[in-house]
Image (cartoon, helix red, strand yellow):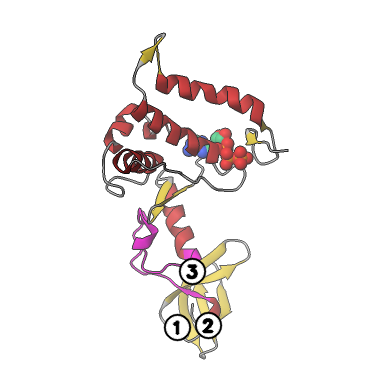
Amino acid sequence: MAASAKVAVGSHVWVEDTDEAWIDGEVVESDGEEIKVNCQSKMVVAKVNSVYPKDPEFPELGVDDMTKLAYLHEPGFLLNLKSRFNANEIYTYTGNILIAVNPFKRLPHLYGNDIMEQYKGTDFGELSPHPFAVADSAYRKMINEGVSQAILVSGESGAGKTESTKMLMQYLAYMGGKAESEGRSVEQQVLESNPVLEAFGNAKTVRNNNSRWIS
Ligand SMILES: Nc1ncnc2c1ncn2[C@@H]1O[C@H](COP(=O)(O)OP(=O)(O)OP(=O)(O)O)[C@@H](O)[C@H]1O
C-alpha cells in the first residue's frame, strides 16, 4: 500500500504473517503511522505502509481473471488462487497469461475430447481458464495469420509444467491430426511419444519424481 494511503479505523486490511504469509482483519486503532488490526486469531500491530487493503466484496469463489480484482497485490492474488483451488478450479487468467495450481490429483473431467470440442474456436476468455484455450488461441493465430507461435510454460520444479505442456500438445494434436494410421490417430502417436522422450531426458529429483534433467 502506498505510504500516503489512509487506513481508516473500521477498514479491512491484509497484514504479513510468519505462519500464514498473509492474514486479514479489521483496523481498530490508528495513529497515522501504526495501526492495530483485529485478526481472527490475534491482535496485530503493523506499520501503515506495510499493509494492503482487502476488498470487502471479494466473491467467495474468487474471479476467473486477476484483472477483475479490486486490488492487485500479493495477498489478493493468493486469496483468489486459494478460493478457486478450494472449488477445484486450478486455472486462473491474468489477462492472457494462464496460471495453473498443481492439484496433485487427477482431474480427468477437465481434459476429455468433449472439453476440447468446447474450446475449439471459442474466443479467449469466453470459457473457464484452461490450457486448451491458450492452445486454441495459438493455433488459430498460426492458421489465420500464417505466423509461427510460441507458448511459454514457466514455473518451479514440480509446479506442473510437463503436465500443462501435455495438455497443450493434446489439444494441438487433436486439432492438427485426425488421420488414422495403423489404427492409431496422429494425436495418440504424438502423445505416446512423450513417455519415450521423458525416459531419456528426465530424472527423479527431490521436488519431482519426473523432472526434466539438464546436465
Ligand atoms: N494438471 C495436473 N493434474 C494432475 N496432476 C498434476 C497436474 N500438474 C501437475 N501434477 C502432478 O505434479 C507432478 C509434477 O508435475 P510436472 O512433472 O508437470 O512438474 P514440472 O513443472 O514439469 O517439474 P520439473 O521442472 O521438475 O520437470 C506430476 O507428476 C503430477 O503428479
Q: Residue 54 location, x and y as percent?
A: 42, 70
For image coordinates 42% across by 46% down, the residue present is: 91
Q: Earlier in the sequence, mark 3 or mark 1?
A: 1
Label 2 beta carbon within 8 A of ligand 1: no
* Labelled disc at residue 24: 3
* Secondary structure of residue under mark 3: strand
Outermost top residue: 182
Asked if residue 117 can be seen in this view, the reply is: yes
CA–CA distance between discs 1 and 2? 7 Å
Q: Residues within 10 Å of mark 3 (few under 14, many from 20)?
A: many
Q: Residue 63 location, x and y as percent?
A: 35, 56
The type of residue carrying mark 3 is Asp
Kindly identify which residue carries mark 1: 7
Q: For this rendering, which residue is in front, 21 or 161?
A: 161
Q: Earlier in the sequence, mark 1 or mark 2?
A: 1
Q: Which residues are magenta?
A: 51-75
* Labelled disc at residue 48: 2
CA–CA distance between discs 2 and 3? 14 Å
Q: Residues within 10 Å of mark 1 (few under 14, many from 20)?
A: many
Marks 1/2 in contact by CB < 8 Å: the verdict is: yes
For image coordinates 34% across by 17% down, the residue present is: 179
Q: Quick check: 124 left or right of 13? A: left
Q: Quick check: 133 left or right of 78? A: left
Q: Quadrant of the C terminus?
A: top right
Q: Residue 209 location, x and y as percent?
A: 65, 33
Q: Is residue 63 in the magenta section?
A: yes
Note whether 209 is above or below 66 in the view shown: above
Q: Quick check: 39 left or right of 200? A: left
Note whether 142 is above or below 79 in the view shown: above
For image coordinates 34% across by 60% down, the residue present is: 59
Quarter holding ligand 1: top right
